[in-house]
Image (cartoon, rainbow, N blue to C red):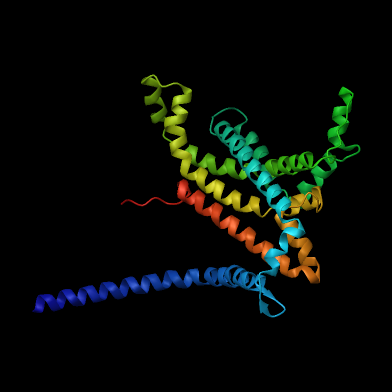
Amino acid sequence: MQINANNSEMLSRSYRAALKKNLVYFLFALPAVIYVISLSFYPAINVVYESFIVKDKFSLANYTGLPGENLYPALIDTLIVSVGALLIQLMFALAVAMIMIKPFKGNRIFSTIVIIPFGISTVVSAWVFSEIFKAIGGYANSFLILFGQTVNWHATTTSELGIVMFSDFWKNTPLIALILFGGLSSISPSMYEAAYVDGAGPFKRFLHITLPAIAPLMGIALLIRGVSEFNIFALPLVLVGYTPSFMNTLIYSNYESVLNVGFAYSASVILLVIIMIYAAVVLALGGGPKYAK
């Protein structure tokens, strides 16, 4: 009986110690929790609620009327630029990361130059590219005129989407490159040496060693950048204005009008749903942590 009592007392002390330790950790995290709830969760819930309220009554009018506010073109343009920019960024970032991991003379200079675009303000980089791709003149046409031709970069929707996609690729590729560089740095060189001895060529080494090692980090990079891509706003607003429209420029243009605030709320909810679906897909395909069964 005495032994059982001692064991119970020890378990009770251990439980209290663990509870106290977890409480300390929670108190450290509490400011972040309050920040997320007050500036993320509450505004999001409020926007969802307001999107269904028209003249103090529950209604779907904000959603049924949204297609007349250019919803479908904005959705298509957002998806085209987001998916296209993500694929381009991922391919170039992987190539850049594989160059950065090589020990060659000038590696530090190369790495510094690669990171610079990410440190530039989005509005500043958008303005720079607006000067490069001016419809008349511009630095791009100043170069092309050497070959006897110029291009009106704002003549079609396709070319304007291409400008936005290229500008976004230049600005954000360094972030993905740094994430993938961290993954490549964790791969032991002995694995490549063993594969080389076994007769595996560069492609097989990449397919069976490099790709599996960095796959989780690729998922994280796609998750981080994908959420930002769907929320693209400043870049297209400076480069092309409100046409072609993107989801966030559509939301902003409606929010500026007192009569169309409800449309802005409903468009925000639709964008939130798209982002949540995208995040769930990425996490399901390998972007989330793996737990042993």
- Quarter of the figure with residue 97: top right
Q: Position of residue 232 (x, y in %)?
A: 69, 52
In this rendered view, identify the residue nearer to me: 187 or 73.
73
> Would you say residue 46 is visible in this rendering?
yes
How many numbered marks have been drawn onto this rendered protein structure? 0
Q: Residue at x 65, y 38 (%)?
A: 114
Residue 27: % across, % down:
47, 73
Task: Say left or right for 157 vs 87.
Answer: right
Residue at (65% x, 47% y) in the render = 79
The percent coordinates of residue 140 (x first, y second) are 83, 34
Residue 105: x and y, percent?
60, 27
Q: Is residue 186 visible?
A: no
Q: Is residue 287 left or right of residue 236?
A: left
Please tell me in which quadrant of the rendered image residue 61 appears: bottom right
Most extreme residue toward the right, as rendered?
136
Q: Is residue 154 above or below residue 22?
A: above
Please state which of residues 103 and 12 is positioned toward the viewer in this rendering.
12
Q: Is residue 228 above or below residue 24?
A: above
* Residue 270 quadrant: bottom right
Q: If the image is split into quadrants, where does the N terminus sit?
A: bottom left
Residue at 78% of width from left, 39% of height from top? Answer: 159
**Relative depth, front residue between 164 and 280:** 280
| Nearer to me, 18 or 200 | 200
